[in-house]
Amino acid sequence: MGSPEGEPGLEVLERLRLGLQIMALRALRDPDAAEEAVQETLVRAVEALRDGRPGNPEKLGAFVRGIARHVIADVHRTHQRTTHLQDTPQAMHPTSGDDPLAALITAEERDHVRAALTQLSAGDREILQLSFFEGLTPVEIAERLGEPPLRIRKRKSRALNRVRRALLRGRQVSRNEVVHDR
Amino acid sequence: MGKTLSCNAIVDEGLVERYLARTLSEAEVDALESHYLTCARCQTDLRLGAAIRAVLPEVQQALRNANQESVARPRLGRRVRIGAVAGALAAVLAGILLVRPADLESPQHRQIDSETEIIPSAETPVGDVATLEEFRWTPVISADLYEVTLYDSAGGALWQAESRETHAALPDSVRLEADVLYLWQVNARVGWDRWVASELVRFRIAAR
């Protein structure tokens, strides 16, 4: 967890950063407030790591999550967000276009993902919709569509792999890297 | 703190999807967040889910609009329709000229899912084929009649047939040449004078 000199490794902090961004964006729904929460959490996490906490490196995730929860609650209060937007019907609606985590996706990544989703079959898109918007498990989707769960799992996995490759290509374009299709 | 999770368990239980859809319990959220804060693989899956949630609604809406336009479009008379198709063919053929031979040799036709299709999709022939035994397409639930049309590469209609099944055989009177590009399309009747059309599909019978 720490470097030989006792300082937390940069790679640990960078790994924490993306995870904290996801967590803060989901909770706060505001990129500026989320960034504030991420920075404050990282500062507190670095201080704790310097103090040798947590004692068990395997507990790092849970430990930092505890810090983040407190920080997010503080930021939430500071920004006077008294309404739990996550509980509103709009947040659950499939046509909602303001998912807070969308802030993590670049325009190039969106373009590539859009193309990949368009090329999927209508059935595979429906499986993704039921998964990511209604939160149904493959077994529940199988019951709804009248197909074997194993088949749903395979279709979902295949569809996700296609979109994953598209996202990767979009990311490489975003970074101006050479794109090699697998 | 909650239970410790593995990446495989997260995938198996669809926890990322349910996390983004906000259908997890507090204990599950606790366990998942504690895991992904230090897990690059799960963070990648969360970004993937975020991308799908950001883009899928607009894709679905665009496709719904396109399908509604297709369903609402009144069926034209045969002559007019073939003329219109010929125009569309010209556009398609312009695209074909840009297609590398390898694209035809390894056609990547979109996956068929007949139970949820509202337009027919060509199944065979597509791309390079060894022989042509019949034309087959996916069913449209509300369709009571299909009409399949074969075109030459210049957009001329070579043959047309109606079928209540999802296949039709080419009669012996129509002979196709090897290594020549052809196109075909199937229309499905879904109501009184209401038809929906498949995409124009190109194929070529390989020379022996």
Image (cartoon, coloured by chain):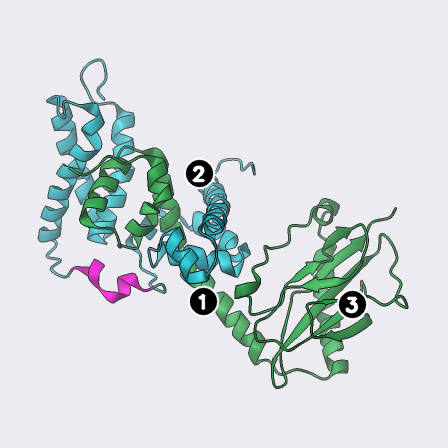
Chain colours: A cyan, B green
- Which residue is at 42% across, 51% downward? A107
Q: Is residue B67 above or below residue A106?
A: below
Query: Which residue is label 2 attached to?
Result: A175
Which kind of residue does numbered mark 3 sit on?
Answer: Leu
Q: Which mark lies nearer to you, 1 or 2? A: 1
Q: Chain of mark 3?
A: B
Q: Chain of mark 1?
A: B
Quadrant location of the N terminus of chain B in the rendered image: top left
State the separation of the CA atoms marked 2 and 3.
46 Å
Q: Which mark lies nearer to you, 1 or 3? A: 3
Q: Are marks 1 and 2 on the same chain?
A: no
Q: Could you say which disc has been placed on residue B61 in the image?
A: 1
Q: Which mark lies nearer to you, 2 or 3? A: 3
Which kind of residue does numbered mark 1 sit on?
Answer: Gln
Q: Is residue A134 above or below residue A162?
A: below
Q: Chain of mark 2?
A: A
Q: Residue furthest bottom?
A: B192
Q: Nearer the viewer, residue B136 or B98?
A: B136
State the separation of the CA atoms marked 1 and 2.
30 Å
The answer to whether mark 1 and mark 2 are in CB contact below 8 A is: no
Q: Which residues fall within the magenta stretch?
A: A84-93
